[in-house]
Amino acid sequence: MGRAHEWREWIERGEAMSYRAIANKAGVASGYVQTILPLAFLAPGLTRELLDGRRQVRGALMGWLRRGIPADWNQQVYRF
């Protein structure tokens, strides 16, 4: 989650404007960036619950990320 937020900051500051640019700067594959970056857009309450252990991910996290995270925060909470 920390990497995702760092990459989001790069986008906001104009340091990297594509998955490929983020991947090059971070030294990872662009597919990995595409999978992980959506974590930076989770509902704030959901993020807090995940980080402090009050909420657990049902199933494998990477599989959940590959299927996609809804943009709507209410849907995110429901799916978790």
Image (cartoon, rainbow, N blue to C red):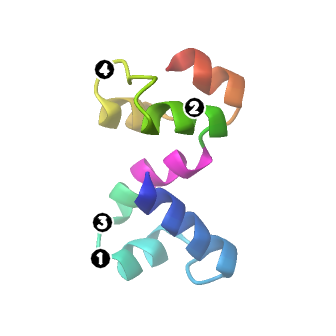
Is the magenta region chiefly helix, strand or loop?
Answer: helix
Label 3 vs 4, first from the N-terminus: 3
CB-based contact (under 8 Å), mark 2 and mark 1: no
Secondary structure beneath dot 1 equals loop
Pick whichever, 70 or 55, lies toward us.
Answer: 55
Q: Which mark is residue 27?
A: 1
Cα–Cα gap, marks 4 and 1? 28 Å
For the record, the magenta segment spans 34-41
The numbered dot on residue 46 is 2
The tag earlier along the polypeptide, 2 or 3, is: 3
Mark nearer the viewer, 2 or 1 = 2
The residue that disc 3 covers is 29
Question: What amino acid is at disc 4?
Answer: Gly
Identify residue for label 4: 59
Q: Is residue 3 above or below residue 73?
A: below
- Any part of residue 27 in sight: yes
Q: Residue at x 60, y 26 (%)?
A: 76
**Alpha-carbon span between mark 3 and mark 1:** 7 Å
Q: Mark 2 or 3, which is nearer the eye?
A: 2
Q: Nearer the viewer, residue 53 or 25?
A: 53
Residue appearing at x 66%, y 80% in the figure: 13
Q: Secondary structure at mark 3?
A: loop
Q: Position of residue 58 (x, y in %)?
A: 36, 18
Going by the image, does 71 lie left or right of 35? right
In the rendered image, residue 56, in percent from the top left (x then y), is placed at 39, 23
Whichever of labels 4 and 1 marks the residue nearer the N terminus, that label is 1
Pair 2/4: label in front: 2
Q: How many marks?
A: 4
Specify which label sits upstream in the sequence, 2 or 4: 2
Q: Residues within 10 Å of mark 1 (few under 14, many from 20)?
A: few
Residue 62, quarter of picture: top left
